[in-house]
Amino acid sequence: MPAGHEQNLHQDGLRKPWATIGVFLLPSLAIYAAFTAYPAVRTIWNSFHRVLPRSDEPVGLANYAELMRDEIFWRSVRNTITWACTSPLVEVSVALLLALALYAKVPGARFFRVAWFTPVLMSYVVVGILWLWIYNFDWGPVNVALRALGLGSWAKPWLGDPNTALPALIFVTSWMWVGFNMVVLLAALHSLPREVLEAAELDNCGWGGKLVFVILPLIRATLLNLVVLSFIGKMKIFDLVWITTKGNPLWATETVSTYVYKRAFEWTTFDLGYPSTIAALWFVIVLGSVLTLTWLFRLRQKLEY
Amino acid sequence: MSSRKRLSIIAIASLAAAGLAGPAGAQQPKELTFWSHWAAEMPKRTFVEEAIKQFEANNPGIKIKQTWYEKTALYAGLKTALRAGQAPDIFYAEPDQVEYMENGFLLDLSDLNWAAVEPWAKEAWSYKGKPYGLPLEAWTVELYYNKKLMAELGVKVPDDLQLPPDAFLEMIRQARAKGMTPMALGVGDRPYPGAHLVHEALLKKLGIDDYNRLLTGKLAWSDPRVTATLKWLRGLTEAGLLPTTFTTLKLAEAHIYFHTNPGALTFLNGSWYTSRAFNPPDKGGQPKDFPLGIMKFPAVPGAACNECRSIAIGGSYVGNAATKHGKEVLAFLNSFASFEMGNRWLDNVQVQTGIKSDPAKLTGPQAADYFKMIAQTNAGAKYYFGIPIQVMTGKPKEVFIQVMNNAFPAGTIGVEDAVKQMTAAY
Amino acid sequence: MTMAALKRAALLLLLSLYTAFAAGPFVWAAMLSLRTTTEIHRNHFAPPNPAHWDKFAEAWFTSNYGVYFTNSTQVVVSAVVILTLVGSMAAHCLARYRFRFNRVIYFVLFSTIIFPPQITIISLFQILVQYGLYNSKLGLTLVYVAIQLPLTIYLLESFFARIPSDLFDAARIDGYSDWEIFWRVSLPIALPAVATTVILNFILLWNEFLYAVVLITEEANRTLPLGIQRFIGDTQEDVGMIATGLMIAIIPVVVVYAFFSERLIQGMTAGAVK
């Protein structure tokens, strides 16, 4: 919170014009209540019911009990968590290297910055289709390049093999988000106080030393923010999987989001209760892990960047 | 009579006249909405579009508002639209969608002209004693092959069109030795092509009754006959039966893979092969003068019933239970239920149908030849009605699709693991 | 050549390689969009020669992209307008007035940023059906407002809070009403921040897929991401035409990016680092 904030608040606030406050806040609160709070509560209500098109029937904890035994669900949890844990590390570390490179004042830094940022502007639908083509067995650039390098035996349908499908998709998200992370880190680097860096220069500690002992601690908060952000994004992932693999093969790329969607709108049941149960439990897991992460990183007081 | 009164009588009379005169007058034509799969399958589209035109000509008060979809988009849209009460009056469905009937979404079609429909096809659409779908499309699983490549390979297809197990394995080995893909098949966008292998083989091995018990969970997947058959299939895939791209190859691509690029020796597919392959070559059809042959699925070692095969009802039209125009919907569906329409379907679409028809009376030369081949592979057949994903539901179905359609034929998991997963699914 | 120059050259090479990797797929897609599928299958990596610009017209008129584009524009533009108005009102209020529960309300609104969409999407489907808003552009618009509201309020609140309060005191002495203070003082000053949220919301919603796929079924109401998805369907993939469709979806974003890249980067990174 910026320093001036608290003072600003009470200046006008002394009068407490409730009617005015109401007018200003009401639209937001109404939208929030109708399209966020009520649906969320209703999902939790659903999770204790069998929700068929023409009838709701309370089933107590039966959905939760079934969920505990549902191997596909746990498989999707494993995949999603794998994704959410590997992606941030890859994205942030590669981004840091790139940001440091640009920070070293190479020519055309502005161009690089703008170019690298582009992938994140595209929808996952566009990105998914593009990478379906890039991974195409016969004419996708990946296999074409491998064959050109004489490594034709390594060519394979990357998204069709349970061993490579998930890593291949994780790679896509990294490709998409590295540039974004880089831009944020670059901004953080530029905001570092010159004197500190110059002091380090004088102390004649090497480039590596400067990075580890001076720069990293200074941008630690930004780094951790990015990790949490990437983590949240991957816990939600749906579009990319839906466009490319739909969770196949053999549930290798099934994520919690795709499984909820399948159970709600694709399976041969019309029941919305069970998928709501998955959503409710997942909600708790996501909330819990984000809170744990921020607590671990002690980011709470640094939430404002 | 006051002038005012007279005016109103004239008005009423003219209104009534307009009503009798039909859509040209004040009365709005009734509009039936209609969603169908087959956006990309021209012969079927043409058949349906002509049927609509004819129906509208015969029933001037009714308009059909038609939208073509791809199957996945259609299914996803219908699932939500039905729940929301916004589904069209008439739509495409297949008989495996029991959930529609369970939840009372489909219009009872008891009053349809069922005399014009094959009894087994009506049976496929019956739920708790009432029929719900017009079974337009019927299909068998056929093993298509390229006659020219087969001859080059020196493989002789026997007179009964069924290769013995060893000869089939030998065929695979020879094809691979010549750098040829023995069988085009892909599961990139469908839950069943790979499962055709397991399906046809297990059906033959077990016979109709035991096979049905297997699919409905009354016979264990660890039954020695099942594992023996899976091991045999495993031998075939390990010999290189399927393309490297099996897991990502889409249905339409598999067609092209078979007849055009790069070309494969055989192609295991529903008899609706024609609806894509008989398009012009630049629309994904097979080349002109393609040497198409059809043989039976090979004999299975120690099979109880090598003449057993499946016939399934595919694309059908159903009415929405919530429609405001039940009578009109029924009339429209009825316009398909005639011997003449059955034969026109065969002639144009060149796939079997659940409507009564007579392949001998076909006039189109291509259709006649094609159905002669289909008749030969189906001679003396004992039919199992349906394919596994039509018989199974819920979790067993999901596991079956992942394991038997994809992972097992792809060679990702072994026989033991596959059996274990199937057993755990029930 | 000195060691330092050599190092610099190596670094530059590395960065260029990464640029090719980051931007390559789009250059490729742009090339594909100007070629016919037959040409593409002859060589997937050849430049468009001749360039078939008419493919864009074809995609627009015969492949229905015109409808998708119009729908996307209608939904996204109205959502962004509502978001900007409603969001800045709330942000102004939360930043300017001190009252009980101010921070509670702020936290409640803001914390939904981390909600996984599943927690609302199934019941949103049920609720929109009940309200008769299912499969309608209006329904989708309102949902879009709801999902972007937390981020909008968050970004604007922090900006409004930084406006010095002297300005407001002066305005009040001049006899401005509460609404006028918001409309004629706060908002104009905050215009850069407002512009950032407008651009940011535009791009995020333009690309939105999950809610659209659940809440829209009819062809006539499809937005662009849904429309594109429809074309990766049953037929032998018409790679050329799909690529043209991809470009139609990308172009508005690219245009916005070309004009506002700095502002957009600012917005996304500020919105990100919360």
Image (tube, rainbow, N blue to C red):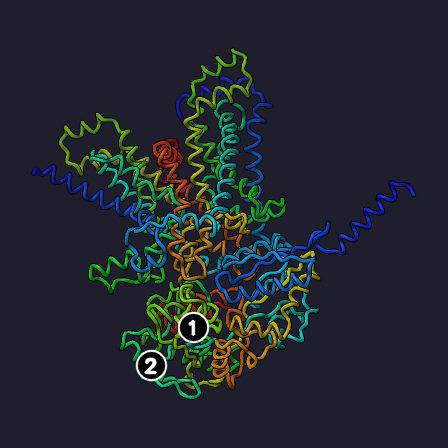
The residue tagged with tag 1: helix, strand or loop?
Answer: helix
Q: Which residue is the extreme one toward the bottom?
A: B159
Local crowd size for mark 2, using a 10 Å CA cut-off: few (<14), some (14–19), many (≥20): many
The quarter of the displayed image where residue A4 is located: top left
Where residue B149 sits: x, y (%)? 33, 78
Q: Which residue is the extreme one toward the right?
A: B1
Q: Which mark is residue B419?
A: 1
Residue at 20% from the left image edge and 33% from the top image edge? A105
- From the viewer's perspective, is residue B102 above or below residue A33? below
Q: Which residue is mark 2?
A: B171
Q: Which mark is residue B299?
A: none
Q: Is residue A215 left or right of residue B6?
A: left
**Residue nearer the viewer, B36 or B64:** B64
Q: Which residue is the extreme one toward the top?
A: C173
State the separation of the CA atoms marked 1 and 2. Answer: 28 Å
Do discs 1 and 2 share a chain? Answer: yes
Q: Is residue A182 left or right of residue A14?
A: left
Q: Is residue B379 left or right of residue C250?
A: right
Q: Nearer the viewer, mark 1 or mark 2?
A: 2
Residue at 78% from the left image edge and 50% from the top image edge? B15
Amino acid on which the number 2 mark rests in the picture: Met
Of the 4 image quadrants, the one containing the C terminus of chain C is top left
Residue at 27% from the left image edge and 43% from the top image edge? A93
Where residue C120 sits: x, y (%)? 53, 46
